[in-house]
Image (cartoon, rainbow, N blue to C red):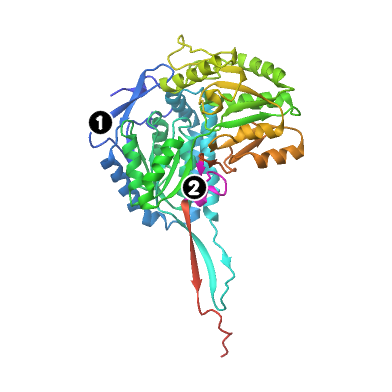
Amino acid sequence: MANPSSTLQLNDKSLLKQDAFVNGEFIQAKSGKTFEVTDPASGKVIGTMPEFDKTDVEVAIKAASEALPSFRKTTGRERSRMLRKWYQLMTDNADDLAKLITWENGKPIGDAKGEVAYAASFFEWFSEEAPRTYGETIPASIAGNRVFTIKEPVGVCGLITPWNFPAAMITRKIGPAIAAGCTLVAKSPGETPFTSLALAELANRAGIPKGVVNFVTAMENTAEVGETLTTSYTVKKVSFTGSTGVGKLLMKQSADTLKKLSFELGGNAPFIVFDDADLELAVNGAIASKFRSSGQTCVCANRIYVQEGIYDEFAKKFTEKVKGFKVGAGYDEGVTHGPLIHDRAISKVEAHVRDAEKRGGKVTIGGQKMPDLGDNFFQPTVITGMTNEMQIATEETFGPVAGLFKFQNEKDVIELANATEVGLAGYFFSRDLQRVYRVAEALEVGMVGVNTGLISDPAAPFGGVKFSGFGREGSKYGIDEYQITKMVTLGGMGQPLQGS
């Protein structure tokens, strides 16, 4: 077994776990099998984690099921205190959590610290929502009846999260589940499991009862783990963040047990710059949206549309900004952008660049792999002269490549922006108030950023439409995904006041 503690300098070494977490204990797979976790910057193995299979996951589901009857009876205020303590522990251990994220994900340490703060904010937010899961009193249509509703936890939940935000994608799901009174089994991403198991250690310290939160790990058996969660009669709810293709598969698998589902799936975000925009603001917004985490986020700008009157100036300023980037390992000083997660990501990015070049696109900066740094590094890239026949127009790149498309008018660009099966996020820049309303209403997406390239906020509902999924995370709506609404009708309530 690899000994990561010899290379990773944590203030609290007990946060580094190479075990899954089931029923309050850190355990290995019954088979004894493990899988290797690599540092995407160096390509070196940094540790191992248990390779769970169906039998192991069923034990975790059982633990969650046995913990549910007592946990669902806790008050919202009790659950609020648990989440608040977990939030505080994340904040207190932010430096160590950031080191773990950079170590296994590769993002620069500054970005990792930002993710920890963002991830912790979901525990804080839902600690405040937990005591406020109100029902309603409803005027009845029948005389003598009284109707009201109560909110109840849906039950045992299966949560499946991706590698690009090892902390935030998990807390965004666990926070509302705990607030609602649910118990859960979370599938840690195989590429980045160490962060989630550090969160498990903090859950123990926060006083989360045994069996309420369980973390299972797998790489080779990922599909088997997913199917175990989706086909279990005990699991009543599945939340998944990942690709549209996998989301469709999980939805099919969940059909026989009619689960409550919420899916945040693939994106292909349009980023539109109108000629009346504040150009500097638009350039900075595009940089933030496109190149955050080296382009490896589901809400990254994937198609940048710039109106023809300002296209050349925008392209020049945008390229100049990219020249200021420093690519390297996430711990290195001054690094702004780290590696991609693995060789498959590199291959897709390179294929998109070569396709654009072949079809007439011009690379103004970047466009090449960076073997001197490592196998998973690619130069931040800007391509002008983009057309709708290029792969970037229809496929999510998920990497540091910005393709700039030219457009003529509002109607044309909206048609281009909506000409995709997915609809997660969209962005546009304009100073015309009437246009702001027209375009925001016309974009077929679940989230719109106007004059900003950053839209994530625990207070804001996060989710998409079309093939980008359904359901919302964060905000006051996020807890609804983990609750059912029960109606109660009282009859015979219309009696007159009784005399003595």
- The answer to which of 92 and 118 lies nearer the viewer is 118
Q: Front-most of 1 and 425?
A: 425
Q: Quadrant of residue 283?
A: top right
Q: Residue furthest left?
A: 31
**Stretch of the chain drawn in magenta:** 469-481
Q: Is 472 covered by the magenta stretch?
A: yes
- Vertical side of 132 occupied by 320: above or below: above
Q: Is residue 300 above or below residue 353?
A: below
Q: Secondary structure at mark 2?
A: helix
Disc number placed over residue 359 in the picture, else none: none
**Res. 314 image quadrant:** top right
Q: Nearer the viewer, residue 19 or 422?
A: 422
Q: Look at the image and tell me in which quarter the C terminus lies.
A: bottom right
Alpha-carbon neighbours of circle 1 within 10 Å: few (<14), some, or many (≥20)? some
Q: Which residue is mark 2?
A: 176
Front residue (pair 356, 130): 356
Locate residue 193, reporting x and y percent: 39, 31
Number of labelled discs? Answer: 2
Q: Position of residue 446 (x, y in %)?
A: 58, 41
Q: Is residue 187 above or below residue 478?
A: above
Q: Residue at x 55, y 41 (%)?
A: 462
Three-letter code, disc 1: Lys
Q: Looking at the picture, does residue 13 appear above or below residue 73?
A: above
| Residue at the image position 30 percent from the left and 49 percent from the top | 62
How far separated are the C-alphas under marks 2 and 1? Answer: 33 Å
Where is residue 79 drawn, in percent x and y? 47, 51
Rendering coords of residue 320 (x, y %): 65, 15
SS at badge 1? loop
Question: Mark 2 is on which residue type?
Answer: Pro
Numbered tag placed on residue 33 in the rendering? 1
